[in-house]
Image: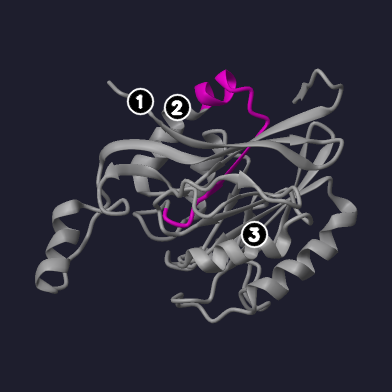
Amino acid sequence: MLLSKQGSWKLKILILGDIVGRPGRKFLNDQLSGYKKNNQIDLIIANGENAAGGAGITAKTATEILGSGVNAITLGDHVWDQMNFNREIDQLDRVCRPANLPSSNPGRDRLVISVNNHRIGLFTVLGRTFMGPKVSCPFQTAGRLVEEMKADTDAIIVEIHAETTSEKEAMGWHLDGKVSLVFGTHTHVPTADGRILKGGTAYQSDIGMTGPRESVLGRDIDACLGRFIDGMPRKCPVADGDVGMQGCLVELDMDRGFPRSIEIVNYRVVI
């Protein structure tokens, strides 16, 4: 955490898009520590819902991701894809599942992370348009959680894991001026609309993925292409070419709890 020329404390937060399989995890293990140091990052948040074999997450893979330098992991519609994770999630105190799943689901519906004497609130909601899980209204859930968390946090970050840009953008406007950042995940393709909205909230519709970009959304090109061409079912394993990380880097003015800037991150190492 740095002190700016104006005298206000600023916090640099890196948000990483969906980690896809072993290639994404390995990239973080190899590169994240250096990237964090070089960019003076205070806090790293990542979506991990595709971290185990490209679908879901396990306690083991979550621990590996946290060990690479990620401070908190969010999840999405593939949260329960891996067998037994529903029995593991309660033991992971830096992992939160989508907040608008039924309350009977295990796991935390929010996190509060302490960073250099500041408390950063974090939660995810699932969109409902073209999405499979039956969830509560993401807009009502987000509004309720912001009200519940604002007295005990210095800043709040909200993820909307959704299929359509319209639903994500609507969430950005819904929470503008109430939270520090609203970012979207799920489509694995980053959007070029990172900006600060008129009420002061930083926003990006989709921050992309951390994984192989020589792929179709992280999966083997030939297998995916074949499914589109002939419609025949086939496995689409995780690809392994041109691995990198995508996301956004937000600098918060902690005197106000609002962003000074948002920067799109698209980082890979060329050998």
Which corner quadrant holds the C terminus?
top left
Amino acid type of the residue tagged 2 in the rendering: Gln
Name the residue located 82 percent from the left edge and 36 percent from the top edge.
254
Q: Image check: 6 left or right of 196?
A: right
The residue labelled by disc 1 is 269
Task: State the separation of the CA atoms marked 3 and 2.
Answer: 31 Å
- What residue occupies the far front of the structure in this picture? 198
Residue range highlighted in magenta: 33-50
Is residue 34 one of those drawn in magenta? yes
The first of marks 3 and 2 along the sequence is 2
Q: Where is residue 75 in the image (x, y as percent from the top left)?
A: 54, 59
The first of marks 1 and 3 along the sequence is 3
Q: Position of residue 149 (x, y in %)?
A: 82, 58
Q: What element carries label 2?
A: helix
On the image, which quarter does residue 86 sit in? bottom right
Marks 1 and 2: in contact by CB < 8 Å? Answer: yes
Q: What element carries label 3?
A: helix
Name the residue located 49 percent from the left edge and 53 percent from the top edge.
206
Checking the image for residue 31, the label placed there is 2
Amino acid type of the residue tagged 1 in the rendering: Val
Q: Residues within 10 Å of mark 3 (few under 14, many from 20)?
A: many
Task: State the separation of the CA atoms marked 1 and 3.
Answer: 32 Å
Q: Residues within 10 Å of mark 1 (few under 14, many from 20)?
A: few
Q: Image check: 96 left or right of 111?
A: left
Amino acid type of the residue tagged 3 in the rendering: Gly
